[in-house]
Image: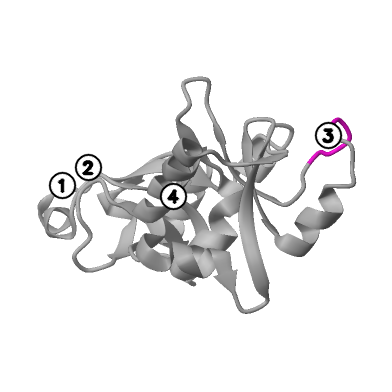
Amino acid sequence: MRPLTEAETRAVFEKLQRYIGENIQLLVDRPDGTYCFRLHRDRVFYLSEKLLKVAASVPRDNLVSPGTCFGKFTKTQKFRLSVTALDFLAPYAKFKVWVKPGSEQSFLYGNHVLKSGLGRITENTAQYQGVVVYSMADVPLGFGVAAKSTQECRKVDPMAIVVFHQADVGEYVRSEDTLT
């Protein structure tokens, strides 16, 4: 387990900025202590400084998950955000999309959100902006990328894709063996 390099930190923060904007600072300097990002086996973990000191005493081969996995680096050194980061992204999300109850299951199976399943969308959402997807009961379901801006969503046909799927909580069941 090691600290992120400058290039890795930039890649992680750029990805997080797409979803939570300037609120990245709130992830690091929290009222309950200081938190940090560490790299272990190509995965980026988010953990407190206290937990970091405890994890340092565990041998590297025996260490499975020192904190919350935020994502991983691909072989081409691109950062891919994981669904396990959803609990930390949802409270700070700048742009949100709510899906209708009939479309929740479709999204949780890994499909994109169609205009017919769109309940609400945050005003002034730009095209290709990172969004957190919620149910109509304000339960975070996952996150994605807006395929259309808020203004375009009003004019498109019902079968048009409005949010590209990135990750959802259904992955806990579909790919539970690869999340750790």
Residue 171, magenta (yes or no): no
Q: Which amino acid, mark 2?
A: Ala
* Image position of 147 (left or right of 91): left
Nearest to viewer (mark 4 / mark 1): 4
Residue drawn 41% across the image and 65% down it: 93
Residues 119 and 27: in front is: 27
Q: Which amino acid, mark 3?
A: Arg
Q: Which amino acid, mark 1?
A: Asp
Residue denoted by label 4: 13
Q: Are marks 1 and 2 in contact (CB under 8 Å)?
A: yes
Q: Position of residue 126 (x, y in %)?
A: 20, 55
* Image position of 129 (left or right of 172): left
Tag shown at residue 160: 2
Q: Residues within 10 Å of mark 4 (few under 14, many from 20)?
A: some
Residue drawn 23% across the image and 60% down it: 125
Q: Residues within 10 Å of mark 2 (few under 14, many from 20)?
A: some
Q: CA distance from mark 2 to mark 4?
A: 31 Å
Magenta span: 60-64
Tag shown at residue 157: 1
